[in-house]
Each structure stands twice: as structure tokens, then as C-alpha cells.
Amino acid sequence: MTALYGGIEAGGTKFVCAVGDAQGNLQTRVHFPTTTPEETLQHVFEFFDQYQLTALAIGSFGPIDINPDSDTYGYITDTPKEGWRMFDFYGSMKRRYPDLKIVWTTDVNVAAYGEYRHAQLTNQSVQDNILYTTIGTGVGSGFIYHGSLYQAYSHPETGHILVRHAPDDTFSGDCPYHGDCLEGMAAGPALEKRAGKKAQELAPDDPLWKLEAYYIAQACVDYTLQFAPAQLIFGGGVMNQEQLFPLVREEFTKLLNGYVATPNPDEYIIHARLGDNAGIVGSILLAAEAK
Ligand SMILES: Nc1ncnc2c1ncn2[C@@H]1O[C@H](COP(=O)(O)OP(=O)(O)OP(=O)(O)O)[C@@H](O)[C@H]1O
Ligand SMILES: [Zn+2]
């Protein structure tokens, strides 16, 4: 019997749970909305109780505590999301499945790992240093550094970097912590507030996309200068708007103004190959490779 691995992509809006093999092929996948921790975990348990797993990986929305020496290791920490602040996610899973190896990391780390490792396993060319960024309900990145997930004192929180307002942009931003940080200005809910309708309902040629690209391009400049990655990969709901990519590349080139060398923007700033599956595939692969 081939080994079966579990993955959880725990988002602030929805949870995705799946089981699959060591190549990241999904066997069964389910999703449900993120409600209270109790109710949501009940769905998680109902799903995984059906399987005999070899290992499981959780990619969670955050910020989360990933420091193994900390008393609150495995907790979701400062989220504004009702009921989830200081929730012991890893511990709750461990109590239900005491003998199971469980990997605990961020939702963007599992997606970054999915993009990296799945490309390798399917013989597609992929660099060893890539920054994966999601623009969805929130903004965040996972950094693959020489083939491994970069985690230090904590994990990067690239969504909350401070950005420069576009000249006529009077929107004050909606990040509950910082107002007009990148996430506050450019995540899906910010687009919705600006437009008065869901981001997916905006026409592809709506002028808001150019404004959106301006903020994402600033992030590309910052990430280039700070991480010096070989590639900037974007995923998340908002980035399904393909028209953003040429706009972001053009604005990025202007803003960086040749200060450092980067690969050709068409190959440097790209859409996730796995699309919306990057996170769940990555969590299965992380589980399969857990030591
Ligand atoms: N096709 C689309 N075009 C533009 N915006 C979209 C599209 N699909 C989703 N969005 C926006 O992206 C946000 C949801 O992001 P996404 O679909 O990546 O979920 P998510 O951020 O993974 O959720 P979670 O926070 O639960 O992880 C919403 O604000 C939604 O309006
Ligand atoms: Zn913020």
C-alpha cells in the first residue's frame, strides 16, 4: 500500500483539506468555510478520521508561532479573526492524532513549497531561491532559500510593508493594524471597498487594476531589494486577473529604475504554475518529506 499524506491549507476565509501521495497527487480534497475554531476543526477531524496517514502538514493563516522553544508554539497569535486569537491549532491536532507526525508552518510557506517542489518532481525548471506571494484576503509571502523554507526568529510578514500612495489615491486603507500598509491598500477586501463590489466583478480594463499594479510593483521592488530572489511568483485570488502581470512588470521596471540587475521581468514576475492548488499540494509534499 502506498503511503498517504494529509495536508491542510487553513485560510481565514476557507479551509482546504486533502490527502495525497508523495508526488503531490491529490486523492481526495474537501473545503469548507472558516467559522469558529471548534466547528472548523470538527470538519477537519471528520475528514482525516477516515484515513490512515503517514504524516500531515498544516499551512495556517497567521501570524502564527513557529518557534519550537516558545510556550505558544503552534498557536495562531495576533489575528483579528473572531475566535482564533491565541488558538492552539497544532496542539488541537496533536491531541486528536497523538502518534501522527505533524508539520506546522504558514499558509504561504506551504504554497511556496508547492510551487518549488512540485516543479522539481515534474521535471520543470525551477530556481532554488524563489519568493511566493499571495494577494487574496490578505497578502503574505513564503521564501524558498536554497531549496528550504526560510524561517528565522519568526516567519516573514511581507504583506504589512509600508507603501507609497499613488498621487491621487485618497483611500486610507483597511488593515486593522496599519491602515495603509500593502495589505490594507491592495488585498482583495481593499479592492472591494474601493470599488463597492467584489474584485472578481471588476472589468479587466477597470482603471483600478493599474492602481493595484502600482502597489504590487512597489512590493516587487522591496522584495527584490530585501530577498534578491531569482523569481517572484504570485498566487491568491486577486492574481487570477492575468492583466495585472504586464502592468506590474512595467511599473516595477520604472520604480526599480535599473538599480540592481534582475532577470527579464517576463520571467521574473510570474503567476503560480499550480494556481489555487499551490498551498494544498505543497502541504502534502511537506508532509511527505517530514523528517
Ligand atoms: N478571480 C478573481 N479576481 C479578483 N479577485 C479575486 C478573484 N478571486 C478571488 N478574489 C478576491 O480574493 C480574495 C480571496 O482570496 P483567495 O481566493 O486567495 O482566498 P484566500 O486569501 O486564500 O482566503 P484565505 O484568507 O482564506 O486564505 C477576495 O477578496 C476576493 O474578492
Ligand atoms: Zn498591515
Image (spheres, rainbow, N blue to C red):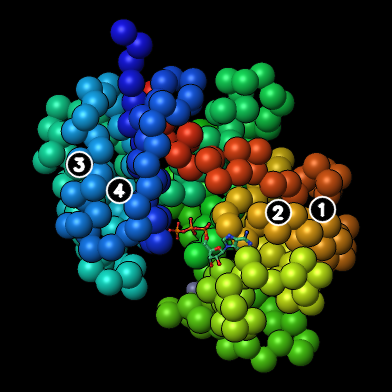
Contact, mark 1 vs mark 3 (Cβ under 8 Å)? no
The answer to whether residue 58 is seen in the rendering is yes
Question: Callout 4: helix, strand or loop?
Answer: loop
| Amino acid type of the residue that numbered disc 4 sits on in the rendered structure | Asn
Residue 224: image tag: 2
User: In the displayed structure, would residue 66 be above or below residue 181?
Assistant: above
Q: Nearer the viewer, residue 147 or 45?
A: 45
Q: Earlier in the sequence, mark 1 or mark 2?
A: 2
Contact, mark 2 vs mark 3 (Cβ under 8 Å)? no
| Amino acid type of the residue that numbered disc 3 sits on in the rendered structure | Phe
Q: Quadrant of the C terminus?
A: top left
Q: Earlier in the sequence, mark 4 or mark 1?
A: 4
Question: Callout 2: helix, strand or loop?
Answer: helix
Q: Earlier in the sequence, mark 2 or mark 3?
A: 3
With 38 as the anchor, is 287 left or right in this view?
Answer: right
Q: Residue 9: image x %, image y %?
A: 40, 46
State the separation of the CA atoms marked 2 and 3. Answer: 40 Å
| Amino acid type of the residue that numbered disc 2 sits on in the rendered structure | Thr
* Residue placed under numbered mark 3 in the picture: 45
Q: Quadrant of residue 202?
A: bottom right
Contact, mark 3 vs mark 4 (Cβ under 8 Å)? no
Q: How many C-alpha atoms fall within 10 Å of the one at disc 2: few (<14), some, or many (≥20)?
A: some
Q: Quadrant of residue 199?
A: bottom right
* Residue placed under numbered mark 4 in the picture: 67
Residue 79: image tag: none
With 234 as the anchor, is 208 left or right in this view?
Answer: right
Instruction: Tell me which residue sits at (60%, 43%) in the image.
Output: 275
* Residue placed under numbered mark 1 in the picture: 260
State the separation of the CA atoms marked 4 and 1. Answer: 34 Å
The answer to whether residue 146 is seen in the rendering is no
User: In the displayed structure, would residue 74 be above or below residue 249?
Assistant: above
Contact, mark 1 vs mark 2 (Cβ under 8 Å)? yes
